[in-house]
Amino acid sequence: MEALNAFLDTVDGFVWGIPLIAVILFVGILLTSRLGVLQVTNLGNALRYMLHSEKEGQGEVSSFAALCTALAATVGTGNIVGVATAIGTGGPGALFWMEVAAFFGMATKYAEGLLAVKYRKVANDGKVLGGPFYYIETGIKERFGLNFKWLAVLFAIFGVLAGLLGIGTITQVNGITSAVATVFPTGEFVNIGGNSVSISTAIAGLCCAGFTAMVIIGGLKRIAKVALYIVPLMAIFYILFCLLILGFNFSHISSAIQTIIQAAFNPSAVTGGVVGTIFIAMQKGIARGIFSNEAGLGSAPIAAAAAKTSEPVRQGLVCMTGTFIDTIIICSMTGLAIVVTGAWTPELGLQGVNITMEAFTRGLSNLPSGPSVAPFILTIALVFFAFTTILGWAYYSERCLEYLVGRGKKGAILAFRWLYVAAVFIGPYLTVSAVWTSADIFNGLMAFPNLVALILLSGIVARETKKFFEKLEKEKD
């Protein structure tokens, strides 16, 4: 197992090296520049469009339902475990770089949503076929006359692997079962596949796999229906408790922000040498940020393509709000809660979800029975967030597979759904380090083809945006 972890760490270091981080930031900065800082100037419009869907337009689900499906896939363990992991390994400064990546990532996510709707295809039965594989294949060919189908195929392959073996299944169920095992410790263990695990871990994993099967067999509309109810409620629930923690520690917020900024540029001064370089803080922050909000990965546009809309720009704006909600709001809440309570400090020796668990325990200590209730609150949030991420990525990876094998292969799609459920089932019995490292690798591999397309089609994005807002101005006159 040590040899496997070493190999994965080597691959992860290569995939998430300076080139990919530089390209992700470059694409976000490029689009931000070409779009006139649209993520600031049109955030209000984006939030308004998010809540008011178009009455007409082709698609399978409402714009809000498409956003909730995308949020279901993004608001997951990355917001709770991923933030803690970034701060634990990269220091508090990782949160700063996570926010920087998210700011520029909003422009990236906007472009992805716009292109997804512009180049989607609607079948005779009304089913929408869309996502990066279509704007990579069709968009680049129309714009430059080049055949980039091979790049679209690569994206789809990486998307299937990311959903099946990375961000979609193993990391999410691993986070769920780890939290459940911490809150409900038992002295009884069972042997599964040569691994000795607690009864609570085994039961949580089995329940998660069972509920996953019940939902994903119903396809997109069932996934969207579940996400439409769970995601907004759980996001509000989690944010309220984070606000309570920050309220109880209000006097420490300003010093926490200073610590985050200082650690972003001089990590060793804050961490005591545990994190010694800016690059490590940047790498951990950006990698975990991308893991959480998925800007640049090309996953969210798969859901955006299914929205009932006739305006690519409008859906791009709605898509952009996903990064704002996921990282600028929810991840920031988690990160601040961890820093103000001191739960991140290396002396505690905590990792992953246990860092956030400690933050909630300390932060809610002023409430009656706060320290004993906090783990249950966090576990509930983690379970629902991670479960909806499993559902969202089931849809993403299935659409990637459908692009590879064709729409008519219903047997292959059904077999994949059950294989996906099996991956959820075995997730709790894999080591945490190997799980997160493999997820990082697949995320990075997905990003490469998508980022190439975004760079090549950035002119199309700018042109469509200009036309849309010129049309709005004329309508006002």
Image (spheres, helix red, strand yellow):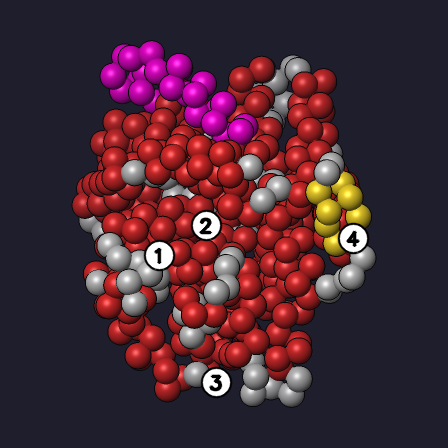
Question: How crowded is the residue under tag 2: few (<14 C-alpha within 10 Å), some, or many (20+)?
Answer: many
How far is the residue under mark 3 from the one under mark 4? 39 Å
Placement of 338 over or under 459, stated as above or below: below
Instruction: Judge by depth and name the residue closer to the eye, 104 or 168.
Output: 168
Give the residue type at disc 4.
Phe
| Residue span colored magenta | 139-161
Q: Is residue 297 visible?
A: no
Q: Earlier in the sequence, mark 4 or mark 1?
A: 1
Identify the residue position indicated by label 2 in the image. Answer: 292
For label 4, the SS is strand
Assess whether residue 134 is covered by the magenta stretch: no
The residue positioned 57% from the left and 34% from the top of the image is 165
Binning the other alpha carbons within 10 Å of mark 1 as few (below 14), some (14 to 19) or many (20 upward) gives many
Where's residue 158, x and y in %?
47, 27
Mark 3 or mark 4: name the one nearer the start of the chain.
4
Q: Kindly identify the amino acid type of the residue bearing the numbered disc 3.
A: Phe
Residue that label 3 marks: 248
In the image, taking residue 307 as reference, residue 287 lies left or right, namely left
Q: Nearer the viewer, mark 3 or mark 4?
A: 4
Task: Please tell me which of labels 3 and 1 falls first in the chain.
Answer: 1
Amino acid of disc 2: Ser
Which secondary structure lies at badge 3? helix
Mark 4 lies on residue: 189
Disc 2 is placed on an element classified as: helix
Relative height, residue 210 to residue 347 (above, below): above
The tag earlier along the polypeptide, 4 or 2, is: 4
Where is residue 260? Give x, y as percent: 30, 68
Identify the mark nearer the N-term, 3 or 2: 3
